[in-house]
Structures are given as C-alpha cells and as structure tokens.
Amino acid sequence: MQRTSFAEMHCSIGQALERVGEWWTPLIVRDIHLGLHRFDDIAENLGISRNLLTRRLGTLITDGIVERRAYQERPLRYEYHLTEAGRELVPVLMALMAWGDKWATPEAGPPVRLMHHECGAEFTPQVCCSACAKPVTTANVTALPGPGAASGPGTRVLARRNGIEPEEP
C-alpha cells in the first residue's frame, strides 16, 4: 500500500510524520535508543525484512535522525546511532508508550518500565509546560497562530478561522 506524503503539508505534525510516520520507523528508533546498534540485531529483534530495514534506515539517515558509524573495515560494517534529532524524538516515543500503557497495554501489563536517572524513581512520561512544569492536557491548552502560520494543505480551515489569508498559488 502506498502511503500518503505529507511533504507539502503546512503543519509541524505533518512534517514530523513525513520523517518518522512510516510503520516500523518508531520501533527502529526505539531499538537504537535501547542499544541495538547493529543491522542484524535490529532486524532480528523486530522481525523486519532486510530490504525494508535498509530503506527505513536510509530515510532516517537522510532526515538526520540516525547516523551510520563504521565499526569494522574488512568487510565494512556499520552501527546505527541516534543523532541529536533522534535523541530528542525519544521522549515523544516515551509519551506514545505511556498512552499505549494506559489505553492499549498487553494483558500481562506494560512490557517496559522507565526509571529516571536523576532521582531513581520509576515514572510515567507526561507532556509538561516548559514555563511552569505542570502537565498539559486538551483542557488547559489553547493553540494560537505561530510566526509561520499560513493557509495551506493541513492548515487551510484553521487559518481561515484565525483570519489568515490563503497563500498565493
């Protein structure tokens, strides 16, 4: 099945999904974060075909989320590591995991627990306000037009509601 491209979407979520929204991609990032750096280990852990893993890793490298590092010269072999952008994606995946633990957890319970290194406590990830550190929810947040607000694919109706003129073709 051909997936829809969000490359023309004028939306940060659409642009993020263009880079990490393909099936398998979040799980590949998760595995690299958890210390699986070699191609064969990632392929075995996920049960993904080698061709598909090659394509997904190539896209992640092109998008600056993963980098290849040679670990052997003869034959040349690489490990895969998260870049700064990849490391900053991990908390997003933790928040998705917390949602899954609450709403789609396996029958036996959550398969992974998280421990915060600084305080030693097990925790459930939350999205919090960067100013006051309190959790954010749909009930206590309002979205306002940002400096890049424009009318285009993915923002047309919202832009119109906010009085933003359509982009010229």
Image: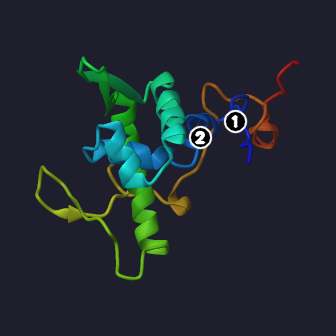
At a point 40% along the width and 40% down the height, the residue shown is: 89
Query: Could you say where residue 70 lies in the image, as x and y percent from the top left?
Result: 27, 21
In this orientation, which residue lies closer to the viewer: 98 or 49?
Answer: 49
- When the figure is inspected, residue 70 is found, relative to residue 138, above or below; the finding is above
Query: Could you say where residue 16 lies in the image, as x and y percent from the top left?
Result: 56, 37
Query: Could you say where residue 78 lies in the image, as x and y percent from the top left?
Result: 31, 26
Q: Disc 2 vs disc 1: Cβ atoms closer than 8 Å? A: yes
Residue 35 visible to an observer of this rendering:
yes
Describe the colour scheme in one phrase. Answer: rainbow
Residue 127 visible to an observer of this rendering:
no
Amino acid at dot 1:
Phe
Amino acid at dot 2:
Leu
Residue at image mark 1: 6
Residue at image mark 2: 17
121 left or right, relative to 135: left
In this orientation, which residue lies closer to the viewer: 111 or 101?
Answer: 111
Crowdedness of circle 2 by 10 Å Cα count: few (<14), some, many (20+)? Answer: some
